[in-house]
Each structure stands twice: as C-alpha cells, then as structure tokens.
Image (cartoon, helix red, strand yellow):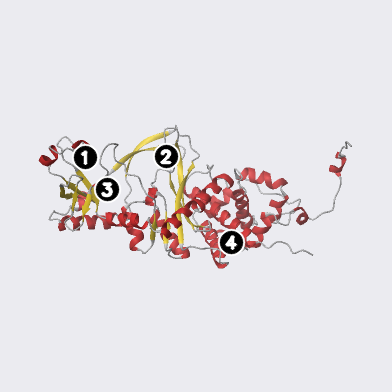
Amino acid sequence: MLSKHNSIQRDQVEMIALDQLVPENHLVRKMEAAIDLSFIYDLVEETYSAVGRPSIDPVILIKLTFIQYTFGIRSMRQTIEELKTNMAYRWFLGYGFYDRVPHFSTFGKNYERRFKDTDLFEQIFYRILKTAAEKNLISAEHVFIDSTHVKASANKRKFEKKVVRKETRAYQEQLQEEINQDREDHGKKPFPPDKFEKEDTKEIKESTTDPESGYYVKDERTKQFAYSFHAASDRKGFVLGNMVTPGNTHDSVILEPLVEQVMDIVGKPDAVAADAAYKTPAITKYLIENEMTPALPYTRPRTKEGFFRKHEYVYDEYYDCYICPSGEILNYSTTTKEGYREYKSSKHICANCPFLSQCTESKDHQKVVTRHIWQEYLEEADHLRHHKEVKTIYAKRKETIERVFADAKEKHGMRWTTLRGLKKLSMQAMLTFAAMNLKKMANWIWKGPEMA
C-alpha cells in the first residue's frame, strides 16, 4: 500500500538532551574518552593576559582543529559551517543547542597572536603519543620511514628563478675528515679546507605566492610547488615523529634527524625500514654504527643497456683494486671531494680488449669505477636484505607508513593545503598526525556502553 509521510512533523517541538542525539559509538565519544585535553591550559597559560576580556577556551580551539583533521574537512571555514548543524561536533566541543559558534577566523588569529612561535602543537602530539604508550599500544622496535608530497597553495606558473647555495649535509664535516684521511692513506695530499668550503650553488624556482615551498618534479605531467611531509611510524601504524620540508628536499637528508626525534620520544629502534630513496652510504653508515638494522630494498643497476653492470667488476679489498670481467686490474687513482675513490684501467690494455664496447665509451679507452669511502656499509645493508627477518620488516612498509600516508590523504585532508609557510604546514602535519593517533587509540581502547 502506498503511504505518504506527514511533513508537518518537522515543526514538532521536542524536549531532548543533546547527548541523546549523539550515537553511543560515535567517534567523538571515543576521542573524548581516550584523553583528557585539559593539559592544554597549562601549555598556553603564559600566552594569555591576566586581565581583559575572557577568551575563547583554548581547548575548544584545539578541538576545532581535531574535528577538521579527523574528519577531513577542507578548511576551518567549512568546519565552522558543519558545527552549526552537526550535533556530534557540538557535543565534542561541549556546546549546547543555542551556543554561538566562533567565527572561522578565530583559530587563525589565535595562532598568529599566541601559538605561532610556541611548541604547543608538538606538545599535543607528544602527549597523545605518550598516552598511547602508557596504554601499551606503541610498538617501536621497528620504525618505518617515508615521505609524501603535499600540493602547496601556490600557482606553479608564478615563480622567480634564483641561484642559492646548496645545503650542507649533517655528516659533511665527518665526511671531509675521512676523505682527507683516505687520501693520506693512499699517499695523496689532503684537500685544503677551502676546497670543501667552495660554495656550491644551484638554480631553483621560487614561488612568488609561497616562497617557502619547493618546486617538485615527479614526471612530465607532475610539476608543482609542494611541501614534503616526512613521518616515522611503528609497526601498528602510530606516527612516532614527523617533519615538514620544502618539496624539493631529498628524502635522505631527513632520515637522521627524524630517527633522532623518534629516539628522543620512544627510544632507539632495533630496525629502520625505508624505501630506495634512503639507500645511501651515509644513511647505512649512520644506522649500522648506531646499532640499528637497515631494512632497505634491492635497487636495480642503472647501467646503460648492453654494458657490464657494476657488480661484474669485483672489488678486491686486500689489494684495494677492481678486477674487470676480462680479468684486468683497475688500480686506485684518487679520492674526490665528494668521497668517491676512483679506480682506473690501463689505457693501452683496454684499447685492444674484445669487451671494450661493453665496458666503456671513453675516447681514451679508459674504464673508471667509483667506490664511496663508506661503501662497505651499503654492501652490509645489501647483505642484510637477504635475511628472513629483514625481509619481513621491509614487507611491513605497505601496511604501516604507506597506509598512514594513504589514510592521511584520503581521509584527513592531506592531499593539498590551504596554508602557506613552513611553520603553518608544520602545525598542520603535527595536528593531522596527532588526530590520526588519537583516532586509532580511541578506537582501540573503546569499550562502549554497558548493556542494561
């Protein structure tokens, strides 16, 4: 039988509590039960004046951002619009039916005036992580590291070309010392300090809209200004540390400070897993010397098609030389200021070699093989790659850090940003990952209402 609903019921007056409108298993109830955010008052107390008009509750300001990043709302403006009609969000903030919601610019103004140069967001991130650790939810013996690019709020066609100085790597001083020691061991003169101090420059594209972003090129179709969000997670998917850099910063530069951040928060991991971008002599040296197992992937040789691959040139550690596929010796020649030893073949022997066309295209028929002074650490990482437990650790990447970034982009609004500047993007990263950790913790410890 066809029936019609009486629309007059929409005008019916009801007597009901806001708490009755929020489902018992709604995520906001789980988040509210998971952690007491009143610790924020102590963190921001010094940024407020003792006299004057009463401010908006700082806990409400932070909860607003948690609503935005937890539920993947595009902006604070839209979050406030959602708050006007969403009873669950009102319940989470402690608002009643008729409480006036704040203006969407309120958080931005408080950020500029109070929170901008503080460590508030880091402290919130750490407190949530600490709470999860106290509940035995963190498992940090294996750490997984990666990064993702977040599209900047900047037009890719509006830029200026600038020549800037290349950044000095954290390990540069140690590398320089070992380069000179290696040269002396081989009877070469050490490089003078000014040889290293010579300014290396590069030309970059700097956005006129957001100068702190970096021009990122992935392929012919993906060229844009972006930021890199770097993160480390445990095997359960909790984010243990994060950093934000311009999009043109190489991943390998950030691993060491990110691991140091994790060690400060939860302690030293037994193993660190990362993708091929992190497979460098400096990183493997850092991990192995600090007694952390590197879980890194196999990398394909980048040799030109039809030529011998580098592994076909055998290194003789005792005599410090290379042996080519035809059995000839490539002797040590020099150590460059970049840290690579050069091993060169004999020109007159190579000129008559039947494998010359597979060996080198050099006009003087001389083959040069390079070897980094820290190459043995890279070779040890390659050796460890075959161990069953290391294979198992590396295989977990797709379930941990890659899952973290997939969820962050699909569910928590991290695919692009409306904010500009490293400080604001660092705030977004901290709050997004804090919200994700809180969401995971809240779901895991939730016991739900007891049945009558």
Q: What element carries label 3?
A: helix
Instruction: Classify residue 24 by image quadrant.
Output: bottom right
Q: How far apart are marks 4 and 1 (CA)?
A: 65 Å
- Quarter of the image for residue 224 reads top left
Question: Of tags 1 and 2, which is closer to the observer?
Answer: 1
Q: Relative to the observer, which residue lies in front, 415 or 198?
A: 415
Q: Which amino acid does label 2 sit on?
A: Tyr
On the image, the x and y values in percent for residue 316 come to 20, 54
First of labels 1, 2 by sequence position: 2
Locate the N terminus by quadrant: top right
**Mark 2 highlights which residue?**
216
Whether pointer 3 and pointer 1 mark residues with C-beta atoms closer than 8 Å, the reply is no
Query: Which residue is label 1 attached to?
Result: 359
Badge 1 marks a residue whose secondary structure is: helix
Whether residue 84 appears in this view of the structure is yes
Q: Which amino acid does label 4 sit on?
A: Ile
Q: Mark 3 is on which residue type?
A: His
In percent of the image, x 39 and y 48: which residue is there? Answer: 276
Query: Label 3 to label 1, Cα distance in Å?
Result: 13 Å
Residue 128, horizontal then vertical, whole percent: 56, 61
Give the mark, 4 or 3, whose residue is nearer the N terminus: 4
Which residue is found at the position 69% from the left and 51% from the top?
89
Amino acid residing under circle 1 = Cys
Residue 299 appears left or right of 56? left
Q: Which mark is residue 40?
A: 4
Q: Which mark lies nearer to you, 2 or 3?
A: 3
